[in-house]
Amino acid sequence: MSSVAVVTGASSGIGAATARRLATEGFHVLAAARRTDRLAALVAEIEAAGGAATAVACDVTSDESVAGLATAAAALGPVTLLVNNAGGARGLDPVESGSVDDWQWMYDVNVLGTLRVTQALLPALEASGAGTIVVVSSTAGFTVYEGGGGYTAAKHAQTAIAGTLRLELCGRPVRVIEIDPGMVRTDEFGLVRFGGDAGKAAAVYAGVAEPLVAEDVADCVAWCATRPQHVNVDRLVVRPLAQAAQHKVHRVG
Ligand SMILES: NC(=O)c1ccc[n+]([C@@H]2O[C@H](COP(=O)([O-])OP(=O)(O)OC[C@H]3O[C@@H](n4cnc5c(N)ncnc54)[C@H](OP(=O)(O)O)[C@@H]3O)[C@@H](O)[C@H]2O)c1
């Protein structure tokens, strides 16, 4: 029986790429998100390529929905990997005028979503005897920037969960890995951030020859998750070559 890897936010971007990649690594992927039509297409694609995957509708902001995710995972086999990827940003407003609703959404999905899903899956991960929890945070988890107050606050909190959990689980068979990507060009991250404004979303990557793509982050997740179980990659920071720091991006033209 294959090990089960649960990937949240698998309906697009980094989550979908991670699901595809983990299937090629031999995991039975449990792909979770709210948009089930997209998940169904992803599962069909993975199966057509010879992999194993199952879709489950899950809203990480709902206790009941996340409980259903844990039940679905346990029914598939030993759960050895959880990738907490669901998340995102809303708005690029200064703190003085930022929308409380946007901040609430970012906190609910990135922070409390990670907490809720981790709590629900931890018993199965521990029972497997070789569990791994990946938290997809961000370089925003350790850096702040103008207009990023809500997102960086949420990602700092998500990073704090990863660090705290690693300390608390020391001596138990579950490792905790934090992956912090810089600029990744995905189809929806910018659209979600800018309320569907494609121009503003595209401007983030203007002149950057090669931002990271979702598959680059999936590659990092897969590499960390397939190290021998005694090897814990605490934190992996990954950026495009053109981005030396949050504020230092090489743009052409
Ligand atoms: N793109 C970047 O530059 C970048 C950089 C660093 C870190 N990250 C982080 O990487 C992760 C993925 O980003 P991405 O670029 O792949 O963004 P994306 O394409 O917008 O994907 C976000 C995913 O989260 C899911 N999601 C949102 N709300 C949810 C909820 N309430 N319950 C369950 N799933 C939910 C979405 O699925 P549904 O809408 O179908 O539910 C979607 O699959 C995020 O945590 C993001 O903060 C991104």
Image (spheres, rainbow, N blue to C red):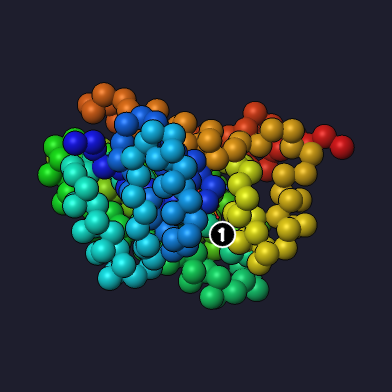
Residue 148 falls in which quadrant of the image? bottom right
Which residue type does callout 1 highlight? Answer: Ala
At x 26%, y 42%, the residue is 4
Q: Does 121 appear above or below 65?
A: above
Image quadrant holding the C terminus, namely top right
Q: Which residue is mark 1?
A: 89
Quick check: is the Cβ at mark 1 less than 8 Å away from ligand 1? yes
Q: Does 227 appear above or below 249?
A: above
Q: Is residue 78 visible?
A: yes
| Residue farthest to the front, as pictured | 48
At x 15%, y 40%, the residue is 128
- In the displayed structure image, the side of residue 75 where residue 62 appears, left or right: right
Q: Is residue 170 visible?
A: no
- In the displayed structure image, the side of residue 251 where residue 9 appears, left or right: left
Q: Does 115 appear above or below 130?
A: below
- In the displayed structure image, the side of residue 252 where residue 170 appears, left or right: left
Q: Nearer the viewer, residue 178 or 18?
A: 18
Q: Does 152 appear above or below 232?
A: below
Provide residue 225's location: percent of width, then percent of height: 33, 32
At x 32%, y 28%, the residue is 226
- Disc 1 residue crowd, few under 14, some 14–19, many 20+, Cα 10 Å: many
Image quadrant holding the N terminus, namely top left
At x 27%, y 71%, the residue is 64
Residue 222 falls in which quadrant of the image? top left
Provide residue 42's location: percent of width, then percent of height: 46, 48
Q: Nearer the viewer, residue 11 or 248?
A: 11
Provide residue 15's location: percent of width, then percent of height: 46, 47
